[in-house]
Amino acid sequence: MLISGQDVHIIQADLLKRQYDSFDKMIKAPLLEQVPVWLKKLYPSLEGDVEDLSIGVLRRIRYSIKKMEAPFKEYDLYVKAIKFLKIECEASLPTEDNIQRNFGLTKTEFQSAIIRLKNGDEYLIEKVYLAHLEKCMAIIAKQTHCGKEMAYDCTIDALLEIRIDLMKGRIRYGNLQSYFTTRAINKYYKKQQKKKIQLVQFPDAVEFYDEEDSEELIEREFREIVRDAVKKLCDDCSYLLRQFYFEEIKMLDIAKQMNKSHQAVRKQASRCREKLKNAIGEKFYQQFINH
């Protein structure tokens, strides 16, 4: 099942604009038919999880296409999808490691707890998530060097959001424990938006099993913080940096838009970058421009 480079380019452009018609037609529809066939051959014992596993495969394919860089080559959808299906299946198997990464719950137990939560039974929150509150706080404090009160606030804020997402079916089984911790650390990011902050180093084992991969969510957090800082600069700097970083317009084209010479705009951009660096801190600035 091959997708041409030109097709990938079209799909990627649509995804970046939050349009999904081409993706749904050229990839989603064929894969929804193909995944059950592959699943019966690879993992027959997981047949009951076809829909959930298909969502995981499609999410990974979609993110993979969004991150691809030109020039495009022939995109072997079959190989990529099989690889992602194996990842999704292995994360669902009731192995000791998988259960440990998911608060000691099997996938069946987690799904049962979600149903109970939707029916008013808070077991999943009170007996599972709250039982790991102290551990999550300790990891946040170690990673960010923040105080116990800040770690507690971030963890509770994350838990409140997670409860909503659990109710809406946005969080999938896979690595729930690391997801809880990482989401709490992201809350710390948001609380530090108005300060000069340093990059939080996330654990290598962190994996996301909701609608976004961890890398995509972290990148979004970076961009939100920088976007907020850019808005607070002077009008010229705000316009210039927004066009360059977020609209991805070339400096020469920006100069034409601003009715200035290319050299003048480059010098101005250098001064604006310094202002941005002073606003968000050296390490965070370097992480953003290199991300």
Image (tube, rainbow, N blue to C red):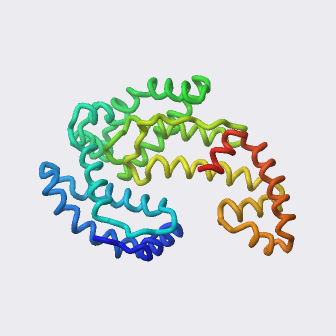
Residue at position x 49%, y 72% in the image: 14
Residue at position x 26%, y 57% in the image: 82
The one of 13 and 32 positioned closer to us in this rendering: 13
Q: Position of residue 85 (x, y in %)?
A: 27, 54
The one of 146 and 258 positioned closer to us in this rendering: 258
Apparent side of residue 89 relative to residue 217 in the rendered image (left or right): left
Q: Is residue 266 above or below residue 116?
A: below
Residue at position x 27%, y 41% in the image: 110
Apparent side of residue 13 relative to residue 25 in the rendered image (left or right): right
Apparent side of residue 140 relative to residue 23 in the rendered image (left or right): right
Q: Position of residue 147 (x, y in %)?
A: 61, 24
Q: Is residue 255 above or below residue 60?
A: below
The one of 30 and 256 positioned closer to us in this rendering: 256
Q: Is residue 21 visible?
A: no
Quadrant location of the N terminus in the rendered image: bottom left
Q: Position of residue 80 (x, y in %)?
A: 32, 59
Residue at position x 32%, y 68% in the image: 28
Count the numbered circles shown: 0
Apparent side of residue 198 relative to residue 18 in the rendered image (left or right): right
Q: Is residue 212 visible?
A: yes
Q: Position of residue 123 (x, y in %)?
A: 31, 34
The one of 9 and 220 positioned closer to us in this rendering: 9
